[in-house]
Amino acid sequence: MLPGRSPVWHETRRVLKLAIPVALAELGWMSMTTVDTIMIGPLGPAAIGAIGIGSNVFYTFAIFGMGLLLGLDTLVSQSFGAGRRDDCHHSLAQGLYLALFLTPPLMFLFWLLHSIFPALGIDPEVSRLSGSFLLTLGMSTLPLLVYGALRRYLQGIGHVRPVMFTLVSANLVNWFFNWLLIAGHWGFPAWGVVGSALSTCFARVYMAASLLFFIWWYERKLHGSLRTLLRPPDMLRLRLLVRIGLPAATQILLEIGAFGSVGILAGRLAQAALAAHQIALNCAALSFMVPLGTASAAAVAVGQSIGRGEPEAARRAGFIAVALSCAFMSCSAAAFILFPLPILRIYTTDTAVLTIGTGLLVLAAYFQLFDGIQAVATGALRGLGQTRIPMLVNLCGYWAVGLPVGYLLCFHYRYGVFGLWRGLTLALVVIALVLLLEWHRASRRAMQSPASRVLAGV
């Protein structure tokens, strides 16, 4: 560290250097679905509904698979901090094996689910289109999981700009093949929703290949380079990767399931309330991409510090990441309160939707701060190798507190969609405060016993 530079300033710069590209990458990831929806729009409501249903089914289970790879954040960052580059490669190899092992059961699940759409009472045309879309999109499972493993590795060693570049440029790849295959250009047939799914498959192959190229480029002069990945599976390391990743994946599934359940409950209300819910939720999800990227930065910064045997720096990095998230989410909350109508009019001009949406954005403003805290605290704890407690806290917060309270307020006390959102707000407040307290305790324990790294004894 340079003379005169405080440890806080040093850690702030380090976290920002990691967080900004990853946050932009998360925005790039989210925008791919937006591009698909916009480009499929001219085909009509059935096509839009089909890719919505197919995408939701695919991402629910694919993101669980991606979540299992989150253990690489801990293993790679701690090994890198300890100067054990060979062990970083070893963990990456096991992550790639895990991606390979997960692909067949996930693809079988997608095949199984596409056949039951008609039994769910979905409109016959939407059911047929969504089934074709899901089957085609399922072919992207392996490249998506390989991309996930390569991304966690690059973030773990601190190379985050390639991840940002890859996701931003993948939007261009996705857009081009959407243009080529949805309506049919340059002599290609007009494949509609199947063409949209194929374009996503091509984009994900590009994403995996791009990150593999960047890893080779950065490490081409290292001894062994990528040849060290060509080794048999290590069941001990695979079990460790799953032991860390499974609670993280379950926590993500619980969170997605909670918000999905609120959407289903909102579907029982008037159309204007459902539309306002979807729009406000999209706004909240967009702002959430920044703390989500900061959470990844926190996991890496904490893990690297623990690997170097610097628990004080790990604790400092975690709290700095929380503070940065709070600063951004405070600005986001202010925008929701001060400019609700300009934000909502980006999506709709319907008077009823605007009226309800304004109230929902105010509620979203209330939980912005807590949503950012819980995301970053989860990432910081993952850097320590602790993923089980965030899973349990999410289970209790959403499913034992938020959803029951929201249901009662909505249907029993007649608050409507506002009751559902008050339940979500309460859940996020509880989850954020508990996880922040757990980070405080866990980081203090790490300072008292700095030798207790996840990789110790492996």
Image (spheres, rainbow, N blue to C red):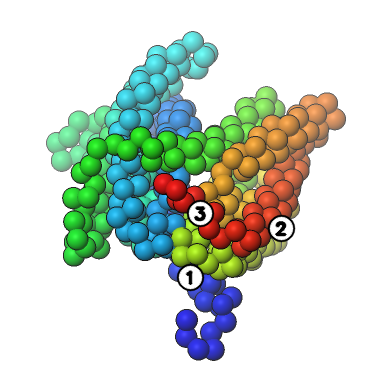
Q: Image height check: is 222 above or below 6?
A: above
Q: Is residue 89 visible?
A: yes
Which of the two residues, 56 or 232, is positioned nearer the viewer here? 232
Three-letter code, disc 3: Arg
Q: Image height check: is 134 above or below 67?
A: above
Q: Which of pointers 1 and 3 lies earlier in the amino acid sequence? A: 1
Residue that carries the numbered disc 2 in the rendered image: 337
**Would residue 266 appear left or right of 240 to someone viewing this image?**
right
Q: Which of pointers 2 and 1 lies earlier in the amino acid sequence? A: 1
Q: In which quarter of the image is residue 439?
A: bottom right
Residue that carries the numbered disc 3 in the rendered image: 453
Q: Kindly report the distance in space between the C-alpha atoms of the residues bearing marks 3 and 2.
A: 43 Å
Which of the two residues, 380 or 57, is positioned nearer the viewer here? 380
Q: Kindly report the distance in space between the C-alpha atoms of the residues bearing marks 1 and 3.
A: 21 Å
Residue 267: x and y, percent? 64, 27
> Badges 2 and 1: C-beta atoms under 8 Å apart?
no
How many other residues sit within 10 Å of disc 3, few (<14), some (14-19) or many (≥20)?
Answer: many
Which of the two residues, 253 or 37, is positioned nearer the viewer here? 253
Q: Which mark is residue 14?
A: 1
Q: Image height check: is 134 above or below 26?
A: above
**Would residue 71 appear left or right of 264 to someone viewing this image?**
left
Q: Which of pointers 3 and 2 lies earlier in the amino acid sequence? A: 2
Three-letter code, disc 2: Ile
Identify the residue at horizontal 49%, vertical 41% (top origin): 244
Three-letter code, disc 1: Arg
Which mark's residue is nearer the viewer, 3 or 2? Answer: 3
